[in-house]
Image: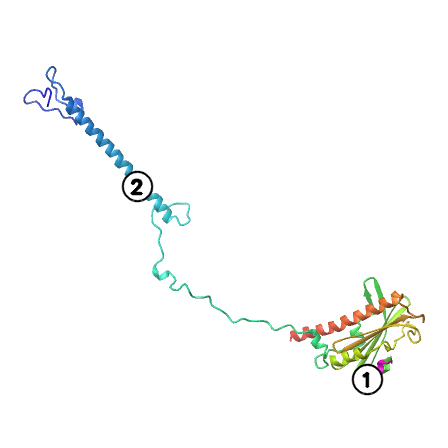
Amino acid sequence: MSYGQGGQGEPPWDPWKPGSQQPDWGSGSRTPDWAALAEASETRNRRRRLLVIVGSAVATLAVGAVVAMAVVSSNGDTTASNKPGTLPGTTTLPSDTTATAPSFAPTSAPPPLDPKDFISSAKKDTAPLSPDILFPGSQLTVGDRVYRKGPTATTAKCATGAQRTLPKILTDNDCTRLLRVTYSKDGVAVTVGVAVFDTKAQADKARSQADSKSIITSLPGQGVATFCRTAVCRSTTNSVGRYAYFTLAGFTNGKDATAKSAEVFKIGDDLADFTFRQIIRRGEAQASSAANR
């Protein structure tokens, strides 16, 4: 149904044109078709809504694509790329992930040489030996105590430098050499005797056979008076490797030593310990020399 379509021959009303471009119908009977206009307006509104919906969907898809590509191609970068990340070709991928790491035959350095091996047998203990080599210098300092070195002696006839039961023990076990040295301090003196054997077994046997009467003969001289020949003195016996060593300590004025004679015990213990360490050092020096050959 239409209202006022105009006269015959006049162009019809176009709902898609603006009012200024519509034909002039004049007044009176030229009344617009309001139903047609309303329908055209609704059509335009539906078209706009459709365009808006489609446009939003496209924008959403575009944003989604950027995020996806940024995640795939970022590769730890702070800037995204518009190119998708690439994977290595099949030829660059490892073909066997179960292979084990290569193994190598274990290597080890030879065990260090034992210094005691060198001082336990005459066959290996070949370094020069004398009282002045074993007891070097002119004095010995132990803590705050300074002992002056006195006379030295060495002999292949071991029995001549021993007393009481010791000469027989040295002879029976084939002692090859006896070294002696004397140290003194403030009226006390000690003589150290080192008996040398071919084997450790001989030295150990000599030590085990020694008793309280197996004593070395004191060695006076160089300002040290004769001591421990008639007076009571303190003696010790020990062994290490192929060496048995003995000490005899007492007063140089002939006074008897007692259990309260601390200075006599001290000088005897200091020299016994020094003798032990010197023999061990002898073995260490020879072991080190052999290892460096």
Q: Is residue 265 in sight in this rendering?
A: yes
Q: Is residue 268 left or right of residue 9?
A: right
Residue plotted at (16% across, 21% down) = 34
Q: Is residue 5 above or below residue 124?
A: above
Report which residue position mark 2 lands on.
61
> What x and y, as percent, mark residue 290?
66, 76
The quarter holding residue 240 reads bottom right
The quarter holding residue 122 reads bottom right
> What x and y, as percent, mark residue 162?
86, 80
Main secondary structure along the magenta-highlighted residues:
helix
As measured in the structure, the alpha-carbon distance from the residue carrying label 1 to the one carrying label 2 is 112 Å
Q: Amino acid at mark 2?
A: Leu
Mark number displayed over residue 159: none
> What x and y, as percent, mark residue 220?
89, 75
Q: Is residue 147 in sight in this rendering?
A: no
> What x and y, as percent, mark residue 137?
81, 70
Label 2 Cα neighbours within 10 Å, binned few <14 / some 14-19 / many ≥20:
few
Report which residue position mark 1 lands on.
171
The residue segment tinted magenta is 164-173
